[in-house]
Image (spheres, grey):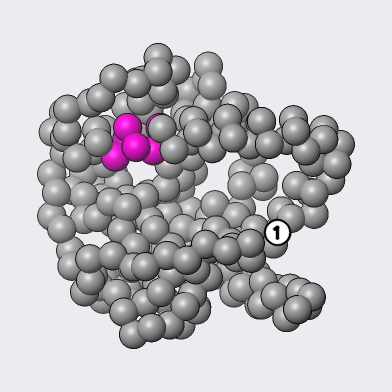
Amino acid sequence: MKFIHEKIEIGYDDLKVETKSSGRKYITPDGEAYPSITTVLGVLSADSIAAWRARVGDEEANKISLKATTRGTAVHDLVEKYLDNEELPKVMPHVMASLSNLKPSLSRIGKIFAQEAPLYSKHLGVAGRVDCVGLYDGVPSIIDFKTSKKPKKREWVTSYFMQEAAYAIMWEERTGMPITNLVTIMDIDNEEPMVYIEHRDNWTAKLKETIELYHLKQRQRPL
């Protein structure tokens, strides 16, 4: 199928990115440095990740993390090209299998307004790069793509919904176009994809609480 694109301008081409040990920051056109929303939300899982690394050991943890990150990036890149109607490159069979698995869910995407768009919010003081903004089942939506080895319960992935709520707020600030529909499309190994649909306003309060927690943790960091 061919996807229809109707680009909506955000006022700039890209944002400069700085990555340090404390996380990633985006530099806005007026020179402000805002933390990445993924860095901010990382405070919610920091303790559990540290416990997991202690349990399996750093070497094994690094190996698992690299494999998951590599797979996630490869699937994201392939989905982006597919939605852009580009000729698909040769990739590893398991990556192409992920795209095939996702196609029924991707077919629900209508007009696409943006892909991999760098966004920021002065209101929230955060920034990030949204996977896709477009119509999903005819509804303007923030659409995020995830990969997982196993199915995940809704209560395990609430950070995804906060991330997407942040993108929705950023998008409205940058374009003036309100979006409240949040769509998570998750590719699962050897399973049908999982699709979560949420409302932005159900997650903004928790998002703001987490941003406050992030800044508290930053103030507590040793100099």
In the drawing, does residue 46 fall left or right of residue 89? right
Give the residue at x 82% y 35%. Answer: 57
Between residues 150 and 192, which one lies in front from this camera angle? Answer: 150
Q: Which residues are magenta?
A: 75-80
Q: Quadrant of residue 12?
A: bottom left
| Quadrant of res 140 | bottom left
- Determine the residue positioned at 78% across, 38% down: 58
Q: Residue at x 55, y 58 (%)?
A: 38
The x and y percentages for residue 183 are 42, 48
Image side of residue 15 versus residue 148, left or right: left
Q: Is residue 16 above or below residue 161?
A: below
**Location of residue 46 by image quarter:** bottom right
Q: Find out whether residue 70 is within the magenta segment.
A: no
Residue found at the very far right of the displayed protein: 55
Residue 114 left/right relative to 66: left
Is residue 199 visible to us here? no
Q: Is residue 190 above or below residue 10?
A: above
Q: Residue at x 41, y 23 (%)?
A: 95
Residue located beneath label 1 in the image = 44
On the image, the x and y values in percent for residue 207 come to 58, 68
x%, y% of residue 100? 34, 20
Q: Can the viewer see residue 88?
A: yes
- Amino acid, disc 1: Leu
Mark 1 residue element = helix
On the rendered image, what quadrant is the C terminus found in? bottom right
- Quadrant where the N terminus sits is top left
SS assignment for the magenta stretch, majority: helix
Please rate how many residues cluster around mark 1, counting C-alpha atoms within 10 Å: few if below 14, some from 14 to 19, many from 20: some
